[in-house]
Amino acid sequence: MTPRPVAVAPAPAAHKDLSVTLFAQGVTAAIAGLDDAPTLFLQFGIHLFMAGAAGVIAARGNLSAAQGRLILEAMLVELGVSKRRAQSFAANANTFAQIPHFRAPVEAGFRAMAHFNETGFVELAVLPEMLAQWQIQDGICHAPEIMTFVTTSVGVPPPGVTIAPEDQQRVIRAHATVITEVVHRFQGREIHNLGNGRIVVFDDATRAIRAATQCMEALDRFARTNPTLIVAPRIGVDTDIAAIVASDYVSAALPRTVTIATIASARCVCCTEAAKDDATEIIEFEPVLLSDTFADMPALFAAKWDQAPVEATGAAPLEYRQVGAFSN
C-alpha cells in the first residue's frame, strides 16, 4: 500500500527555519514507517537525501555556501543526528554530491523538497523508494566514518637550487622507508603516492599524530646525518568523516591535508582543530599563524613533542620540546 502524504502548511519563504523543521518532520515520519530501522548505510542515503533538499532551500534563498551548510546541519539535527556529526556531514556534502554513486539520493531529496515547496506535502513514499534503489550500492559504497588523513612531503629544492637526481632519489627512498615503518607500527593505510609525498589514513587521530611526529623525527635524523641533501619534510593532518567508494576515499579532509602539507613550515606537523581536539589529551599543540593568503583554511595547530638530541652538523634541527608525550 502506498503511504498517504502528510499535509503540512507550506512555510513562507522568509521563514527558512520553519521550512527546515516541517520537512524534517515529514522525513522523520517516513523513517518511522519503514519496516526496519535504517542501517548505517541507509542512514547515509537519508543524509544525502537531506543534502538535496537543503540545496533547494539554499538555491531558493540565494544563500551562500556557508549558509547552505547551516541549513543542512539544522535539517540533520532535526532528524536526531548529533551536532558534530551533522556539522561534519554538512561540511562534506558538496564533496559527496560530486560523486556519481551518490547522486541518486541527492537528486531524490531535491525533487522531494521542490514538491514540498509547491504543495506543502511531504510525500512519504519518496524516501522508501529512494532507499530501495540506494540499497543496490551497498558493498560498493560505505557509510562515512571519522578518519584522520596524514599527508607528508619531503619538499622540493628551492628556486635556483639544482641537486643531482640520485640525491633526490635518496631522500624519496628514505621517506618511503619511514612511511612503511610508521604505517605498520600505528596501523595506518597508505592510500596515495604523491611522488615526493604520501597520503595515509588512520582510524584514530592520536595514532595518526603519533605516526606523523615519528615520521618527522626519523626524517630529521636522516637530514642530520646527510647534511648535503635537501630534506624539508612537511606534514598535514586533518580529521573528518570519509566515505569509501570501491577503494577510493571521499572526504573534504583528503585534499585539505595536501594543502596543509604544502603551506606548513618545514619540519612541522600541522593539524586542523578537529585533529587537535581528538588528540589534545595526549599531545600538546600551539597555534599556527597563517598569512591572509590562506584565509579560507581552518585554524591550524602544530604538534609539539619530545625529541632526543642527535649529534650532527649542517642541518637545521627540530625545535626541542619538553612535553613528554613521545618520551617512550
Image (cartoon, rainbow, N blue to C red):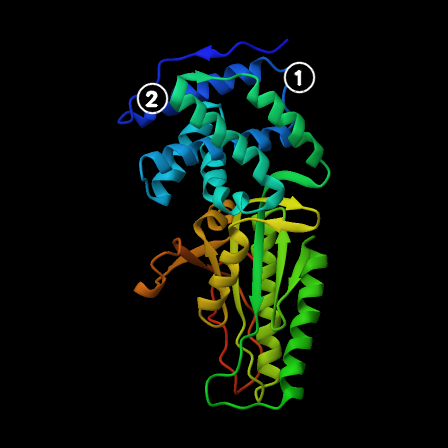
Compared with 211, 80 (above or below) is above
Tell me which amino acid carries mark 1: Asp
Which image quarter: residue 44?
Answer: top right
Please tell me whether mark 2 sits on a helix, a strand or a loop: helix
Q: Is residue 278 left or right of residue 42?
A: left
- Identify the residue at image location x=53%, y=43%: 97
- Identify the residue at image location x=49%, y=80%: 316
Farthest-out residue, left: 14
Mark 2, Cα crowd under 10 Å, few <14 / some 14-19 / many 20+, is some
Q: Tell me, for residue 121, which label it has, or none.
A: none
Farthest-out residue, front: 118
Percent across and percent down for residue 197 are: 60, 69
Residue for badge 1: 36
Res 291 seen here: no
Tell me which amino acid carries mark 2: Leu
Percent across and percent down for residue 163 are: 57, 90
Q: CA distance from mark 2 to mark 1?
A: 29 Å
Q: Is residue 168 left or right of residue 263?
A: right
- Identify the residue at image location x=66%, y=25%: 132
Between disc 2 and disc 1, the foreground one is: 2
Residue for badge 2: 18
Please tell me whether mark 1 sits on a helix, a strand or a loop: loop
Please state, as top left, top right, bottom left or bottom right, where the N terminus lies in the image: top right
Percent across and percent down for residue 39 are: 65, 26
